Image: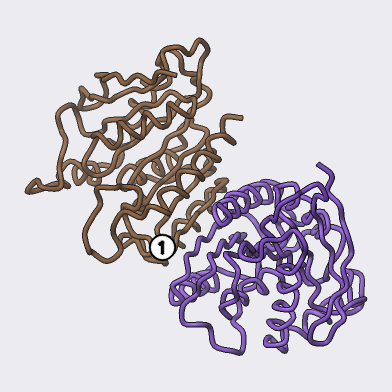
Chain colours: A purple, B brown
Amino acid sequence: MTIERQAIVYDGPGGPFEGLTAMDSDWDSPRPGVMIVPNVLGAKEIDFVVAERIAALGYVALVADVYGQGNRATREDDAPTRFMDAMNDDRPLLRDRLLASLAVLKGLDGVDPDQTAAIGYCFGGKSVLDLVRSGTDVLGVVSFHGVYDRPSYANVETMTAKVLVCHGWTDFLAPPDVTVGLAEELSTGSADWQLHAYGDTGHGFTDPTAKGDSPGYGYHPDSDRRSWQAMENFLAELFA
Amino acid sequence: MTIERQAIVYDGPGGPFEGLTAMDSDWDSPRPGVMIVPNVLGAKEIDFVVAERIAALGYVALVADVYGQGNRATREDDAPTRFMDAMNDDRPLLRDRLLASLAVLKGLDGVDPDQTAAIGYCFGGKSVLDLVRSGTDVLGVVSFHGVYDRPSYANVETMTAKVLVCHGWTDFLAPPDVTVGLAEELSTGSADWQLHAYGDTGHGFTDPTAKGDSPGYGYHPDSDRRSWQAMENFLAELFA
């Protein structure tokens, strides 16, 4: 197995965008495709590593870009949330950029367009939930320490994508009432949903670079490992 | 592999009790042991089948009896909850009967007494949570559609057993506030806990005999399969 990364520049509303694909060039039949939506900072090395791990599971991975080529942030920036803030202020545009990215994934050589899913972290978790809310044609999504506020547009009446929410119970962005609210929202949409809550686990629990003593925040190796395993099981079920 | 069932009669407070073991007689080294605590009706065929499935995973299984030999109920009885009711009225006695059953498991030929766990269904889910609350020496427990009311005695200050709660979101016995209450209780006890909530899933979701149109109740094949897989992962982590 030789997993190869490749940068990909693509078009869409407000583009160009720059993502990254990971796949095994030896594959000779179409594979399921998984879109990865990065956290607040945009596409970066830890997302590319996730893409390689997804490819190692046998799927074609695409790290999506919803900020635009070159629009990337670091935690050290003066305004690290500036690109995310713009998207949060225009959720229809976020949705449309996600759809443009998903179309790229479905159109990749070697991807079975009927077998796709999306996963996302933090703001990317919110993004994949928006795919569910807007009735996008994916088999399922996984949100890791996502953000649960609803978009400005109305949800579809029946959510068809399956949903796995991997949630840190002490996440400072999602106290219990917000988490219960998400469960009720997904129930109202008749989604096939699961929520895996992890005790003593805060926001960013999958991210080894999420360090510090802030309450409700930080990398958690056990929850990272368990949520990845849950995702593996979930994708295997989707693509069976 | 030849899994063998064997009835076992054992002593304890208010005994005798009659359980059932399942293991492979070809095993030649000690294995982890898993205690299974049945639902409201007491030990019966579906529990024995679970024991065989646990044994097929490589573990010695013991179906526990906390009602007393011959004390079994069916849904058709005039008072199907009578044995459970007696235990609910005396949680210290329930705990002591659980401890007697666990001691039997740990003492079985072929069980590594340092590698044990307990799983339970419905009332049995409550029972295994009581093991956690009382600081019992097991590596972990799994509650399937358990009942979450606390016992009359105080919880241990630090819960050492790991906990997996497999929970149907629409379970009529555990609305969201009760479920959140359990999460907070386990957090206060500093347990290493996970809660897997399944949408559109009611009480008894693992039980193919749980039929009917009652809201918040009934067998759910997807949640049954997913929760079993979560349990397999959890036990593998405990016994690694």
Residue B10 seen: no
Which quadrant is the N terminus of chain B positioned in? top left
Q: Residue at x 87, y 56 (%)?
A: A5
Q: Which residue is mark 1?
A: B169
Q: Is residue A87 left or right of residue B116?
A: right
Residue B215 place in picture, x, y as percent: 27, 66
Q: Residue at x 25, y 51 (%)?
A: B210
Residue B127 seen: yes
Q: Residue at x 79, y 53 (%)?
A: A23
Task: Residue at the far front: name it.
Answer: A28
Mark 1 surroundings: few (<14), some (14-19) or many (≥20) residues within 10 A? many
Residue A84 place in picture, x, y as percent: 78, 79
Chain label for disc 1: B
Q: Is residue A187 left or right of residue B192?
A: left
Which quadrant is the C terminus of chain B positioned in? top right
Residue A63 place in picture, x, y as percent: 79, 65
Task: Residue at the far left: name it.
Answer: B78
Picture layout, residue A56 above or below residue B48: below
Residue A210 place in picture, x, y as percent: 79, 59
Q: Is residue B211 left or right of residue A203?
A: left
**Quadrant in the rendering for residue A41:** bottom right
**Quadrant in the rendering for residue A164:** bottom right
Picture layout, residue A12 above or below residue B114: below
Q: Residue at x 81, y 73 (%)?
A: A65
In the structure shown, which secondary structural element does the residue marked by tag 1 occupy?
loop
Q: Nearer the viewer, residue B193 or A234?
A: A234
Query: Residue flagged by tag 1: what amino acid is it?
Result: Trp
Picture layout, residue A86 above or below residue B68: below
Q: Nearer the viewer, residue B155 or B169?
A: B169
